[in-house]
Image: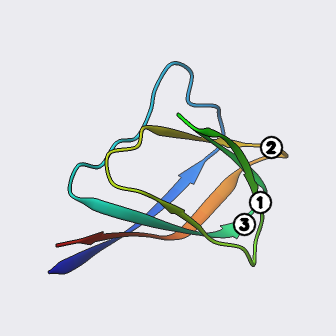
């Protein structure tokens, strides 16, 4: 059981690229800007004050909607 914490920033779309974690679920907590998370299951708009949990093994891309984004925490929870 454990966790890893990462901080990310982005100002451009993830063209033909995805994130993927086979270790555990990812909890995404945005700090700045609106973002579009695209997964195998569909799309999710995410703003400051909201969270998203991406299940283990799901491929996803995070793209800024209006200008740059900053993800304060991207927490990887694994068993």
Residue that sits furthest to the top in the current view: 16
Q: Which residue is rendered at x = 80% and y = 43% of the image?
A: 65
Q: Residue furthest front?
A: 41
Q: Secondary structure at mark 1?
A: loop
Between disc 1 and disc 2, whose residue precedes?
1
Vertical comparison of 16 with 35: above or below = above
x, y (%) of residue 6?
37, 67
Which of the 4 image quarters holds residue 70?
Answer: bottom right
Q: Secondary structure at mark 3?
A: strand
Residue for point 25% across, 77% down: 3
Viewer-proximal residue, 12 or 52?
52
Q: Quadrant of the N terminus?
A: bottom left
Could you say whether the residue bearing mark 2 is in a helix, strand or loop? loop
Q: Which of the two discs, 3 and 2, labels the residue nearer the N terminus? A: 3
On-image quarter of the C terminus: bottom left
55 above or below 62? below
Q: Residue 25, position in %: x, y?
A: 36, 63
Q: Quadrant of residue 33?
A: bottom right
> Residue 52, labelled with which disc?
none
Q: CA distance from mark 1 to mark 2?
A: 8 Å
Asked whether disc 1 touches disc 2, contact meaning CB atoms under 8 Å apart, the reply is yes
Residue 65, labelled with which disc? 2
Which residue position holds label 3?
32
Dot 1 surroundings within 10 Å: few (below 14), some, or many (20 or more)?
Answer: some
Separation of residues labelled 1 and 3 (CA atoms): 4 Å
- Residue 5 is situated, as x and y percent measured from the top left of the image, at 34, 73
Q: Where's residue 36, x and y in %?
A: 71, 45
**Are there few (<14), some (14-19), or many (20+) residues within 10 Å of tag 2?**
some
The residue where tag 1 is placed is 33
CB under 8 Å between discs 1 and 3: yes
């Amino acid at each position: 059981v454990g966790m890893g914490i990462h901080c990310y920033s982005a100002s451009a779309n993830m063209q033909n690229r995805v994130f993927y974690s086979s270790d555990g679920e990812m909890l995404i907590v945005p700090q700045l800007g609106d973002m579009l998370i695209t997964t195998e299951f569909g799309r999710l708009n995410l703003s400051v004050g909201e969270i998203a949990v991406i299940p283990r093994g799901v491929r996803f891309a995070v793209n800024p909607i209006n200008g740059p984004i900053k993800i304060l925490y991207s927490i990887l929870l694994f068993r």
